[in-house]
Amino acid sequence: MTTRSAPATLTLRRPDDWHLHLRDGDALAAVVGATARVFGRAIVMPNLKPPVTTVAAALAYRDRILAAAGPRSRFEPLMTLYLTDNTPSAEIAAAKASGAIHAIKYYPAGATTNSDSGVTALERAYPAIEAIEKHGLVLSLHGEVTDPDVDIYDRERAFVDGALARLLRDFPGLRIVLEHITTREAAQFVAEAPPRVAATVTPQHLLWSRNAMLAGGLRPHYYCLPILKREAHRRSLVAAATSGNPKFFLGTDSAPHARHTKEHACGCAGCYSAPVALELYAEAFEDAGALDRLEGFASLHGAAFYGLPPHDDTVTLVREPWTAPAEYPFGRETIVPLRAGEAVRWRVAGNSPPRGVS
């Protein structure tokens, strides 16, 4: 709970989103503005169909993102490549030379949306990971095992204890971001690891436990991977994110899926948070009595880890409740955001939230 009264306004250096899904085509055009209105930069995930596995594909995707954002936008997409069992070391060297690609994304095959082309066994990607280490790029990790014998709620912990520990041992110079952490164990591992290891934290994992997804019925718009965990884990994530430790920074994992693909017998994993992301982080930090540390988490820590300067301009949050739309246009479909149809405590001043479906 809040331990001191919150200010009426809060001004931050412009934040960045260090973990974002934008999709492509009409879906990209529908969602990129929600991020670009607030965030200066974003690490854009490569799990398209087909996945972004080459420098040429990443640069072409970057051009499409910039075109969708529009000529007046200052938003800068920071590109990634999708790691496979067969990613050539030469492609990693070319990624570094491009200046536009900042991370290589590891998906265990079958772990999440569009991950079927991911790594089937970590050791098979070791030649590419050695090149990632050599060229100083970041290895971005979806940190879960896919062993069907491991309970879905334990898959992050199993990854941290096994694969992540091996990576740190085998690649002593490798820079790693453990993405969208969800457990006490992951937060503790990152906090105790060398400075070359960091983590992103999403708004949904700071604000909600698995009760939000399951209590009173199945609520598919809270379903994401890694899945929401117990309340004790949520509290540990809040403690890590609000600690001021520069190893923890903002990464929304905003993952747009059309409404009908979420509200389905086999619904897609992913929460669409972009229209309310910074506002929801402000709620989490306010509840923890740590609004004075939001700027570091949102605007400074990630930039420092990636070796980029912080932004010179600012955004201002106003403590003025508004109601998030029940849905937004999404090409020919609609999409449901987090906090749909409910009150949001903060809003970004001078920058109206995206309009919902009328």
Image (tube, rainbow, N blue to C red):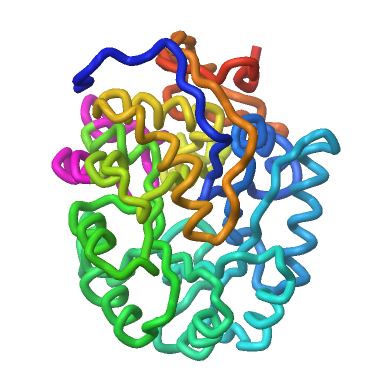
> Where 30 falls versus 65 (above or below)?
above
128 with respect to 301 (left or right) = right
Q: State whether residue 155 appears in this view.
A: no
Total of numbered circles in the picture? 0
Q: State whether residue 92 appears in this view.
A: yes
318 with respect to 196 (left or right) = right
Q: Quadrant of residue 260?
A: top right
> Where 32 falls versus 24 (above or below)?
above
Front residue of this view, candidates 175 and 311:
311
Residue lying furthest left: 232
Q: Kindly identify the residue that appears in the image at 48 percent across and 32 percent down.
A: 277
Q: Kindly identify the residue that appears in the image at 63 percent across and 22 percent down.
A: 354
Front residue of this view, candidates 341 and 350:
350
In magenta, the rendered stretch is: 212-236
Counting from the top left corner in percent of width and height, residue 356 is at 62, 18
Counting from the top left corner in percent of width and height, residue 212 is at 27, 31
Residue 349 colored in magenta in the image? no
Front residue of this view, candidates 185 and 47:
185
The quadrant of the image that shows the N terminus is top left
The quadrant of the image that shows the C terminus is top right
Counting from the top left corner in percent of width and height, residue 178 is at 38, 61
> Where 304 falls versus 72 (above or below)?
below
Residue 215 colored in magenta in the image? yes
Q: Quadrant of residue 120?
A: bottom left
73 with respect to 49 (left or right) = right
Q: Kindly identify the residue that appears in the image at 62 percent across and 87 percent down.
A: 88
Q: Kindly identify the residue that appears in the image at 24 percent across and 37 percent down.
A: 209
Counting from the top left corner in percent of width and height, residue 67 is at 82, 44
